[in-house]
Amino acid sequence: MTRPYRSVLYIPASRERALEKARELAADAIIFDLEDAVSPEEKVRARELLAGVLASADYGARARIVRVNGLGTEWVEGDLAAFAAHPGVDAVLVPKVNAPADLDEVGARVKAPLWAMLETAKGCLNAGAIAAHPRLEGMVMGTNDLAKELGARFRADRLPLMAGLGACVLAARAEGKVIVDGVFNAFKDEAGLRAECEQGRDMGFDGKTLIHPAQLDIANVAFAPSEAEIDLARRQIAAFDEVLSQGGGVAVVDGRIVENLHVATARAVLAKAEAIASLVE
């Protein structure tokens, strides 16, 4: 991963003020939404507005991802035509991807890298094949739609969604793709958001999709290596290098063994910390 995706903020493409404000927000990536966040009567205007904004606005190091309307809708052809080769777009996000064929259909029209929304039972069951698609760069969990399709009840621990979430994380990691967790709806519940971010981080997600700028700081902290983790990573690498120089293969740090696999993890922690630091330089 060349850039962090700790915080991925949805911005309605129809709201000009929000599009302007997003240029200053501490989001690692922005999903400019033409789908759920835009009413049917506003979709054409939102598409035209977004195309113009992305042609001229500077969003800095933030990844610029456009979520188009779903396949089979009356707006998708216009969306794909507008952003097929748009210079201000880093990726096109496809809603409700059920199988690799959905990405084939979009990929035939779009030059930008593709991202996939995993928000259906079929999508989760086919996550491995979807993640292996050669044009795919990232995956986004659509937990609201997934819960609706499953008929799952809300639980703070998200136990009813774990099978789908886990399958998608496994698929992303098997294919080396970015994967970000679904949204947390209660944007004023900071403790709840923090707990869900920490759960997603511990599961292996790269970051979290967000619905409000007030959620950015919590997600950025949760998905970044802590100072303690950075310190431990440095000490593990140093200890292991020292052991190797003496002909050994296993070090001990803080009473725990350190082998090759731990050093690989430690180097990944430092690389992520460096990528985050580069965003503010």
Image (spheres, rainbow, N blue to C red):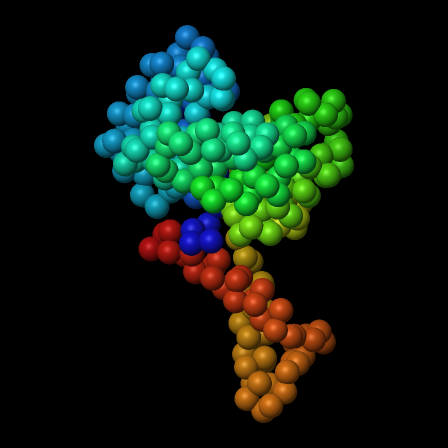
Residue 17: where, in percent of width, then height?
34, 23
Foreground pick, 126 / 226: 126
Farthest residue to the bottom: give it. 246
Residue 215: where, in percent of width, then height?
52, 36
Q: Residue at x 49, y 33 (%)?
A: 103
Horizontal side, residue 149 vs residue 113: left or right:
right
Q: Residue at x 73, y 39 (%)?
A: 163
Residue 226: where, in percent of width, then height?
56, 58
Residue 198 seen: no
Count numbered badges in the picture.
0
The quadrant of the picture occupied by the C terminus is: bottom left
Residue 161 seen: yes
Foreground pick, 267 / 137: 137
- Residue 179's quadrant in the figure? top right
Residue 257's place in the image compared with 84, above or below, is: below
Q: Residue at x 46, y 29 (%)?
A: 105
- Residue 193's quadrant in the figure? top right
Residue 161: where, in percent of width, then height?
71, 34
Residue 73's place in the image compared with 213, above or below, is: above
Farthest residue to the left: give it. 56
Foreground pick, 9 / 148: 148
Farthest residue to the top: give it. 41
Residue 97's place in the image compared with 239, above or below, is: above
Q: Residue at x 39, y 12 (%)?
A: 42
Foreground pick, 191 / 45: 45
